[in-house]
Image (spheres, rainbow, N blue to C red):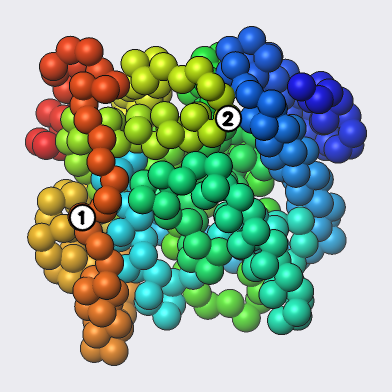
Amino acid sequence: MQNLEKLAIDADLLSIDPGIQNVLDILINDYHNHAKLNDFGSFLVYKGLKKRLDIRLSMEIMNENMSSFKQDDPIFITGLPRSGTSFLFDLLHAHPSLRSPFTWEIFQAQSIAKTKIEALIKKIRTQVELFSINRLVPQLYDIHPMHYAQPEECQLITAYDLKSISFAYSANLPNYIKLISDSSYESSFRVHQMFLNALSSEADENIWLLKDPCHIAHIEEILNTYPKARFIFLHRNPRFSMPSISNLAFNLRLGYSNHVDPILVGNQMLLYWQDATEKLLNGRELIPKDQMIDLQFNHLIDDPIKITNQIFEKFSIEHDETFERKMTKRIGTKKLKSKHSYSYEKFFRASGEVENKFVNYISYFDI
């Protein structure tokens, strides 16, 4: 493996954020000692970490010379993975007043595109990266399709602070998973806010619409950064969501390593997300009642229009018949039944293993 240890020093980040070295050290140790990367996986890990650190430095430099713009009341869609958050994200994104970061904006965050040509170059680069990812993990298109011109999850933004479950989806990183589970994400949401600020302007009247399952674990940090943040919580029984996210991680890891244990993957996902739901149950007490709404996955699938209307009414967001027609068209073209197939037994040995871990969450939301 190439010299990962020098990455933070080479990126000149230590003077800006000394804490990033500790995260990087644990991440690198896990890559060396546990991930069992193949040669191509080692190359991609080095390239990916270097890119993220370089972009983080660019973001810090941009932030020094940029005015701060109002981002008081973003909307965060969150819930356990595979609980309908992506489907809802896609529907709400059709609203003209809601703005989400596109995949190409996240992938190419080292600078802001000021011309159509600059934006086009960034989009092409992102298409090339996505093509490479899909070749590495062919199943990804069916499990979690990504498109350069569609919005993407915030875990790709917090990855610029080296805190993101996305790293552990693609490799066996046991100590890193414990680190991000136990750590504050204050610095990560500082980076998150920098990113949104770079895409904002004084004339902007749009509301930021953001999505990530991981947000259930970081309510306090989000409210510290965005005091008027609004939350849409989607709830689905973990017996469906845990095998699904385990299968995503399993297939991603197969692209980086020739040694992937599905039971180990299932156990890691189970522990991480069970801890996240406990943080949700505690953290939601910090949210004013008028800043959150709880929704059931089954209700969203049964009547998406009704659910979106509930959201708009809750948060006083106006919409018209034109938007409703646009949303109805999206529902018609969106495949609610994905080609993604997986089994409970592949990742969990005992029947009821998942349900027993999530008993508090299941009981609280009656799912």
Tell me which residue sits at (43%, 77%) in the image: 97
Tell me which residue sits at (65%, 68%) in the image: 123
What percent of the width, then of the height, locates residue 135? 54, 48
Q: Secondary structure at mark 1?
A: loop
Visible residue check, residue 320: no
In which quadrant will I find the C terminus? top left
On the rendered structure, is 142 left or right of 157?
left
Tell me which residue sits at (29%, 21%) in the image: 347
Q: Secondary structure at mark 2?
A: helix
Q: Is residue 161 above or below residue 23?
A: below
Q: Quadrant of residue 185?
A: top right
Residue wearing tag 1: 337
Front residue of this view, candidates 47 and 163:
47
Say what amino acid the circle numbered 1 marks. Answer: Lys
Residues marked 1 and 2 touching at CB (< 8 Å): no
What percent of the width, then of the height, locates residue 206? 50, 74
Mark 2 neighbour density, 10 Å: few (under 14) some (14–19) many (20 or more): many
| Lower sequence index among marks 1 and 2 | 2
What percent of the width, then of the height, locates residue 287? 35, 45
Q: Is residue 92 above or below residue 336?
A: below
Q: Nearer the viewer, mark 1 or mark 2?
A: 2
Circle number at residue 256: 2
On the rendered structure, is 149 left or right of 86?
right
